Image (tube, grey):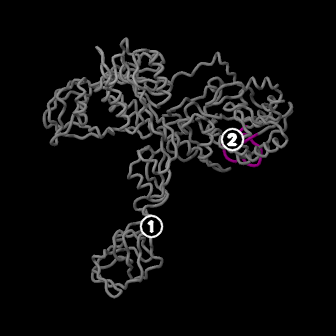
Amino acid sequence: MTLFQSFVMVDWSGGNDTGPRPRKDAIWVCVARNGQSEDPVYLRNRKVAEDWLSRFIRTERAADRRVFIGFDFPFSYPSGFAKAITGTDDPLALWEWLEAHIEDTPTTNNRFDLAGQINTQFGGKGPFWMNGLRRDIDGLPRTKAGYQNPFPDRRKVEDLARGSFTCWQLAGAGAVGGQVMMGLPVLHRLRNLFDGQVSVWPFEQLDKPVAFVEIWPSLTLGGAPEGRIKDAWQVEQVALSLSQLTDQELMGQLDVSAAEEGWILGVPQDKSKIVPPPLRNDCFALPAGVAWTPVDEALALLQDRLRPVTSSQPVSLPQAMGRILAADVIAHRSNPPQPNTAVDGYGFAGPIPEGTCVMPLAPGRSAAGIPFAGEVPAGSALRVLTGAALPKGVDTVILEEDVTVQVGQIAFHGPMKHGANTRRAGEDVVEGDVALRAGRKVTPADLALMSAVGVSDVLVRHPLRVAVLSTGDELVEPGASAGPGQIFDANRPMLLSLIDRMGFIPVDMGRVSDDRDQLRARLDQAAGQADVVLTSGGASAGDEDHVSALLRQAGAMQEWRIALKPGRPLALGMWSGKPVFGLPGNPVAALVCTLIFARPALCLMSGQGWAKPQGFDVPAAFEKRKKPGRREYLRARIRAGQVEVFHSEGSGRISGLSWAEGLVEIEDGERHIKPGDLVRFIPYGSFGL
């Protein structure tokens, strides 16, 4: 049996309706069978094209013909993007996500706005670029100036296909980004419409009667003959060429493996020659010539080079507690939804001048949840209760304590200002306004606010998973027998608890001895189970410092010699695409490095943005002379309105961590602190503990 009887090639467009006359930069399709092609068909917009394709597939299926349909745009994005958006690296899940978020009509679409929203999740400087609209869009740059991409710029196939374009560019010459964003939703709908009848190459086996395949006509074809529209001519030539292939020749072209990124038909995938892409390990590289990095510079580098890594998911309001908002929360309803009274009393139309005022009392009342249905006549008053909607004819309320009520009348003394004792509609939040910003960790008060403005579901980020691994032959578990030269592992329980208290998910990877193969296997496991890896010990340059050695072997190791005390060089690297923070083995230094460096980085990667701890200027209850050159952090606590520090600065004194309630930060320069001088105290609570 022949693999396919009908070959359809589609030249797509990300633009708007191109009008009734055939032209370039529109959508062109061509059908070929048995080595013969039909005339190319002009389709003026995506709605027309989608309808044409659905009719064509129905006709072909009724005739029992197997159909091969090629589309000239990428079927997926570079590795990591699908998972960051949907939580899974399945590109077909990304099709579904885009179909749910793209708004498309023949005259307008939201691709630029959606790209800006996506960019905002990753710092607002990428992955998408080139705003093709006249108005500015938050998060979407017009050029690549200042552009930063948290993902690879190209798929592996595009590194092999010379002249191919990046899918991140949304407008301008050579842009295919708009085609991808506007094309994948259409493919998703067609796939659903013909459920169980469509296979998508190379993500699925081509065992269904309809195949969707990625093509690139310009891969092998040049310009069109004189008088022909290039796009129309190219789809004709590709359809004709494919219809002339034998099944064996076609299967040879289809025999590729690219389950996440997809592939371009016709690009050879010589498995013996393909090499993995270079590790994206330069995000931690320091400028040339840097020896010791000041703390503020190191923090600025981390903030600039890291990006959120967590994907998002919709959850109901009760499930949102403690989660990070992945998008702004928009008020569905104003709060208050309508003007209402702030007190129990009597309402009327104000203002009231100075002097005695007597008003007839209208029958009925307005209570919270039971509004008054009528209109209060001018010059009359109505009984109102706290929270009640103000009926027509009422805009001012007087407290019941200030009123005399008798025989259907009320009497009180003016003056009364217009609007007294009332709340305006939307004076808290107006419908359509942003109630909460993306990146916020949801609190109980936030749940109240979102409920009040009619929000029942929100988009939140998946919790950041942080693996914690201890290294060293000298370590044993607490409670076990410790031999000569061995110590109990104090770091791992401390770090796991720190991660949990900060709101992330700790992943305990246990201890590993000073064996490079065992450490390599454990790092592989950690990278598979978590978004970030924290190691302690083995991060320096000694013979048994295998963490730094393995990261160097992977070509993904930077040793930041940070000018701080306590602390040693901080090892930063990438392992299987996951950031690794190599912390010192000393528990005091490990805690300080975690709080000062790892915590803000983890917050940024979790989607909540860079987190600066709040410090307070407090009188010192100690004296200290400090030399210039390094920033110092002293274990400290507050007593009697002053800050006192632990009696020893020794980094091996773990008891000082328990004694302390925070850290005193002493700036980089020289300092002579005397009792009563102001110093900066950062309580543990400012670090989320």
Q: Quadrant of the N terminus?
A: top right
| In front of the other: 412 or 441 | 441
**Quarter of image, res 354:** bottom left
Most distant residue in the left direction: 675
Specify the amino acid type for callout 1. Gln
Q: Secondary structure at mark 2?
A: helix
| Label 1 Cα neighbours within 10 Å, binned few <14 / some 14-19 / many ≥20 | some
Residue 338's tag is 1
Res 225 seen here: no
Residue 446 position within the rendered picture, expressed as x and y whole percent measured from the top left: 40, 52
| In front of the other: 535 or 410 | 535
Q: Secondary structure at mark 1?
A: loop
Most distant residue in the top direction: 543
Residue 292 position within the rendered picture, expressed as x and y whole percent measured from the top left: 32, 21
| In front of the other: 82 or 266 | 82
Q: Which residue is mark 2?
A: 187
Residue 21 belongs to magenta span = yes
Above or below, 537 relative to 455? above
Q: Which residues are magenta?
A: 11-28
Query: Horizontal placement of 210 versus 478: left or right?
Result: right
Tell me which residue sits at (38%, 15%) in the image: 545
Q: Quadrant of the C terminus?
A: top left
Q: Give the overall secondary structure of the magenta segment.
A: loop
